[in-house]
Image: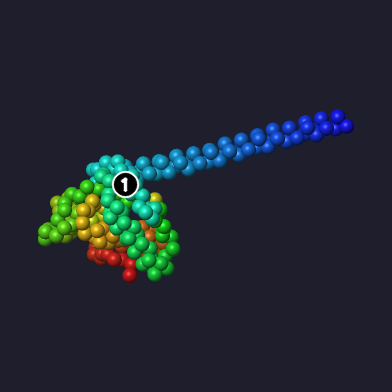
Amino acid sequence: MTSNVGRREMHRKAWEIGMKRLFVKGFLLALGILQLYAVDAYAQDRRVLARAQQVTGDRFTVAVTTLRGANVFAVTRPSSQMLAAIDQGLSDLFAVSRKNRYSRRLNYRDYTIYIAKADRNRDSTGNYSPDIAVGAGQYAGTDYDQGGYIFAAGMVIWNSPSAFVIAEHDRDLKRVSDIVRYEGEHLVLYHNDRRRYEATKDHSKGGGHPILQ
């Protein structure tokens, strides 16, 4: 009887040791996978950040999320009203996208918005219009060309992950919502309707926003 009990105890301990080893191996494997994803996400974010800084000449040292989960990087901390305007623009984007039967990239967390310092606060007619100055590129020689650069309300800087840049605003936040929706249209089209995206991705040959009706 004592011998059988001893053998059962040995088997139980061996089973426990085996299960602990399996648990440790599984934990280490899961940790390794998470680290790979973290490294990839970090590298991806660094590339997008570098592009945003190259386009604007700004350093984005403030990182926040909107109430609905969109990622925001800024030069100075944005107001709660500014963040709410971003959420509203994305909500408008998602509503019109679903109306057009698009289903991909319709989550707030899919989007990263960079808020840059405005290079001008008023347009040529004197209206409040915070914009960023970017290289003319394909707009060279068009009505937009200001001598090698153009003023833009917003600009897509990366398609996947979905990221764009806008200028700081201290009022007229309806304009912010509109810009967010309009830049988001390009990204929704990129992920849902590549042919329409290619036809509307820039306005150097005409056309404008809203693209989606």
Question: In front: 160, or 107?
Answer: 107
Q: Position of residue 9 (x, y in %)?
A: 78, 32
Q: Residue furthest right?
A: 1
What colouring style does the render use? rainbow
| Observer able to see residue 96 | yes
Q: Kindly identify the residue that appears in the image at 48 percent across and 43 percent down.
A: 37
The secondary element bearing badge 1 is classed as strand
Query: Amino acid type of disc 1?
Result: Phe
Question: In front: 109, or 148?
Answer: 109
Question: In front: 104, or 20?
Answer: 20
For the image, the number of numbered tags is: 1
Question: In front: 188, or 20?
Answer: 20
Q: Position of residue 31 (x, y in %)?
A: 53, 38
Q: Quadrant of the N terminus?
A: top right
Which residue has dot 1 on it? Answer: 73
| Observer able to see residue 165 | no
Q: Position of residue 202 (x, y in %)?
A: 28, 59
